[in-house]
Amino acid sequence: MCRMFASRVPGPATMRRAFAVSSGKAMRGGLRRLGLGNGTNLPGAAALAIDPATLSGLAAQIPNGSVLVTGTNGKGTTCRMLAEVMLAAGMHPILNHEGSNQISGLTTTLLTRSGLSGRLPADERAIGLFEVDEGSLPAILPQIARPRAVVITNLFRDQLDRYFEPSFVIGMLERMLRKLPVETTLVLNADDPRLAHIAADLKNPRQYFGVADSEQSRAGADPSSDSPRCPRCGGDLSYRSVFYAHLGLWSCSRCGLRRPAPQVEATKVELLGPVSSRLQLSTPVGATVLEVPFPGLYNAYNALAATAAAIACQIPESACSAIQRCRPGSFRMERIMVAGHDIYLVLAKNANGFTEVLRALLADGQPKRLLLGLNDYPGKQPDTSWIWDADFNSLCGLVPAAVLSGNRSADLAVRLKYADWLGAGAATELVVEPNPVRAFRLALEGMPAGDPLWVVSTSVVLSQLRSWLRRYGYAGQPWREQPGGAS
Amino acid sequence: MTALRITVGELYPELMSTYGDRGNVETILHRCGWRGIAADVIQLRPGDRIRPGEVDLIIIGSGGEAEQALVASDLAEIKGPGIREAVEQGAAALAVGTGFELFGHFCQPGDGPGLPGVGLFDAWTVRRHAAVGGHYDTITEARADRAIGDVLIRWGDTLLVGFENHSGRTYLGPTAQPLGKVIRGYGNCGDGFEGVLLRSAVGTHLRGPCLPKNPQLADFLIGAAVARRNGEARLQPLSDGLEDAAHQGAIQRARQAARGPDRRLALPVLHRPVSGRVPRRPVARAFSARRGSAIRQHRRPVGED
């Protein structure tokens, strides 16, 4: 009798994991039933408190290893695109699509899929696809067995109250990459001088992506650019083209270090208004056209990152058609229909994000109505001084009316005043209303029927707005949405 | 009345501008423009000298620690004499964050090589580690060595609001006059004071865009610059409704942060040195040997009102 069950009786380690996982699952169910949020973080945190090895234990059960996507901007969208590619290739990506990208969020994703015993269902096509907060990579990377590829989208200054300066993050990433197995592919942005040669002495294969269309070139470095120095000698960098921020065709004027030739390169970029873009690609598997279903150069970069990662995972075949099918993630140009108006929810949480989103929206020169939001997270990220690095100046005059919202809307109003939005000639009609719902109503009030409204904001305003819209049946539940339509 | 004119010297516009420092220059230029004061900007990069008679307001922002190390000797040797002389002659100056640290005698990043300073202010700065030197594996570790949070200080009969995010502690020498008293936040080195004021030169840890939400401070600098160039200092008042609203919001936030449930996170976590014992020649010993214990304690706000 005893022998019969011997193989089924869990050892102390797995018993602990089973307890951790089942507590996490119970907590997630409870949180959601009680309407206390989506339960995308706390369950994982609880499981980790019971068994610190929960994440590593669960991740080790994924048969095809995992792909980790990190960087300042675009990691979520890159993940969604890559998930589509994986699905099209017949794989089953396990993605933290709810957007919780720190260690407890990843743990929650895995424990949600796992059985009560702490085992993931056997699926030989499963592959991990994790969006990882760049600051959490040191904690997460050692726990992920068989990392197939690490994708770094870009590195801008972001959340200086949390990450301090970009060079600090770079140093931390570099130390982490040195601990990777030698077969893990690094998928890197060739146009970002700080990333292109990161940990240059490593033997790991590198897959580069970049843009090479000089027509997209801007006059000079953006005000939001960090003006990085040469990563090898510290010399001045010179640019043949700047595409945005400090991304471009760079070389060092002192030691000659230059942008590596990308395997995946957009030789031509056509930005098609505030909805989409078209890229001519050259890739190791041939030239092709990629239709990106999202606007702006920043999304073109995300599509390039996803394509390069697909090649690194040896699934390049259906990459282009799959990316084309990708739907926006929550708050990434997410469209909701309210009272005959198309409402677009767009997340922007740092200087570069805000600048690029606004540029993508306003590039066609058509005046647009905006609701701009700015929130801090008291005690967590209290600093919003990055709004002074966002380039509002070049957009003044294109916005006839804007409502400002969020608990830091007063700061945003001052910023726009000093970007001449109120000046003669530009004259944007500005209304400040900290409450997102009231701000939304104000924005809709004076709007001609059928006009779209663009809500560009940090996340708190967007979540408050959406949960209000959801209550009135306008929006679905964000955690039900997953690439490929699978639930 | 002849048209008023000032010249602003912006130091290292690319390198020393990590924390939204552009906001300070924008504020000066706009507030001059609204009053009909013509403001020219001279951007001063590595290698450029400062002609003291030329600039009326010198601004240096806060770069990262790597950029600070990069510009230190250029600032001290090539620009230093011009800066000291200009301020001596009555020019205004604003030095913020890591730029402020370089306006003292020296800046010592713990175990790294010391950085020379301009020596304008009788002050010096010490930090436990150079953040970029590879001492910290995680953000939590690095965070424990920094003062991060909203700051509220009393400056004369008004309040200044801002945000601090620094690992350097600035100690003032006997001849230095602090800019203000700390009501909320950490300030220079936890001794209850923040910044330095020397004639019309202001040094402060209020990072990045400190002028937009403190229009009085901006006008103090503009007034000094105008007086030096044109011999008159009366500035026409502006309608500051938006600025005042943001200022009031920041005051409220700073006060709430100290009261609310997030108190432990919102307040800076550096420890304060034993009162009355200001190290003459500060060394790394000035910091708590063990992070954890002493550092987690809160400083009692000085100058509570």
Image: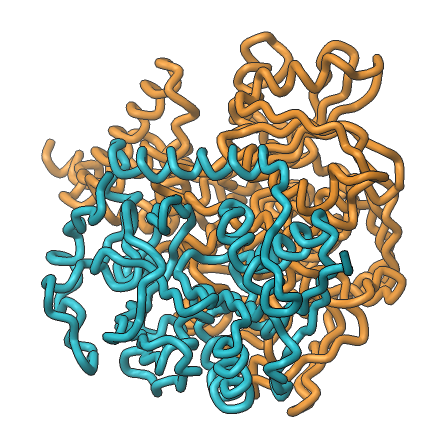
Residue at x 48% of width, y 82% of height? B84
Q: Which of A263 and A423 is in front in this view?
A: A423
Residue A122 image point, x, y percent: 43, 39
Which percent across, then down, holds residue A481? 58, 27
Q: In this view, does A206 lie above or below B270?
A: below
Q: In this picture, is B272 found above or below B216?
A: below
Q: Say which residue appears at 46% left-offset and 64% top-offset.
A: B96
Location of residue A223 by image quarter = bottom right
Rendering colour (chain B): cyan
Asked whether residue A180 appears in the rendered view, the answer is: no
Colour of chain A in the rendered structure image: orange
Q: Can residue A229 be seen in this view?
A: yes
Q: In this view, does A218 lie to the left or right of A194?
A: right
Residue beneath the point at 65% across and 45% down: A354
In this view, A422 is above or below B272: above
Q: In which quarter of the image is residue B51?
A: bottom right
Query: Which of these two is toward me, A239 or A122?
Result: A239
The colour mode here is by chain
> Farthest front residue?
B1
Residue nearest the viewer, comparing A37 with B206: B206
Give the position of the N terminus of chain A as an image quadrant: top left
